[in-house]
Image: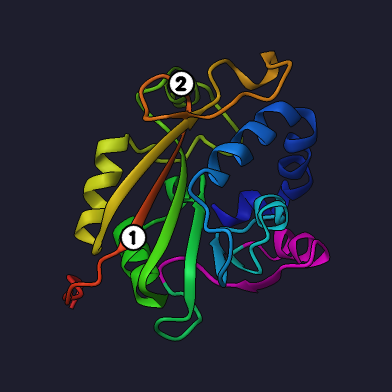
Amino acid sequence: MSGVFDRYYKKYDSWYDKNEFAYLSELAAVKMVLPKKGKGLEIGVGTGRFASALGIGYGIDPSRNMLKIARRRGIDARLAKGERIPFTDSTFDYIAIIITLCFVKDPLKALIESNRVLRNGGKVIFGIIDKDSFLGRFYQTKNSLFYRQAYFFGVKELTDLLKMAGFNRFSYYQAIFKFPDKMNSVEKPRSGFGKGGFIVIGARKSTKKWKNKLN
């Protein structure tokens, strides 16, 4: 998938300008669970649209062209994938994974890696297009340039994966209640899930002793 993003990185980045209300609504939902301080990492930082707007200092991505733009936006962005994060244990206070997980080859491994580089009690923040929502169903049938090879998650499925990877204390918010190109204002996030197309999930790294299930 990195080849598609590397080739069409300008088209990807321009989506946020063309769909500004959707982008700002997603940012608002992420902010509901994002810590107000601490050292943060975005996995799948892309062109840095979210990290730069949310004050996340570090990012990784497999697309070299995307990283060039992210660095220009002030992110310490490095070439890497979520399954192998190039940082030592307990480095970050929080990690954001926004949209990215649907493109990851081994999602559970990426979540376990996230657990590894988080400090005890650290937070992980996900933004997903809920596969069971109107927007998820649309993207699963549309021959999208970026989403044609994506694997969409439902909220319960991702929550179960997070539990397997050593996370607990979940919170949920939703946004995007109409198609992005039909939006004419920024939407206020709502708690829970089931109506919005974009779901934010927050979870904490368990402070209990946890065994890496891949070993």
Residue 79 lies in the magenta-colored region: yes
Between 193 and 73, the one nearer to me in the picture: 193
Q: Residues within 10 Å of mark 1 (few under 14, many from 20)?
A: many
Between 186 and 6, the one nearer to me in the picture: 186
Between 174 and 188, the one nearer to me in the picture: 188
Image quadrant where one finds the C terminus: bottom left
Q: Position of residue 22 (x, y in %)?
A: 66, 28
Q: Which mark is residue 191?
A: none
Q: Residue at 59%, 17% (x, y): give it.
A: 179
Residue 17 lies in the magenta-colored region: no
Task: Classify mark 1: helix, strand or loop.
Answer: strand
Between 70 and 27, the one nearer to me in the picture: 27
Q: Residue at 32%, 34% (x, y): give it.
A: 154
Q: Dividing the picture into quarters, in which one does residue 145 lie?
A: top right
Q: Residue furthest front?
A: 36
Q: Residue at 58%, 30% (x, y): give it.
A: 144
Magenta residues span: 63-83
What is the number of callouts on the image? 2
Which residue is identified by label 2? 141
Give the Cα separation between the discs numbered 2 and 1: 33 Å
Q: Is residue 9 above or below residue 25?
A: below
Q: Residue at 76%, 40% (x, y): give it.
A: 11
Q: Residues within 10 Å of mark 2 (few under 14, many from 20)?
A: few
Say which label, 2 or 1, has the lower sequence index. Answer: 2
Q: Position of residue 13 (x, y in %)?
A: 75, 44
Q: Position of residue 192 (x, y in %)?
A: 37, 30
**Residue 175 shown left or right of residue 65 in the figure:** left
Q: Position of residue 170 (x, y in %)?
A: 31, 48
**Residue 181 shown left or right of residue 213 in the figure:** right
Q: Is residue 17 above or below residue 185?
A: below
Which residue is identified by label 1? 204
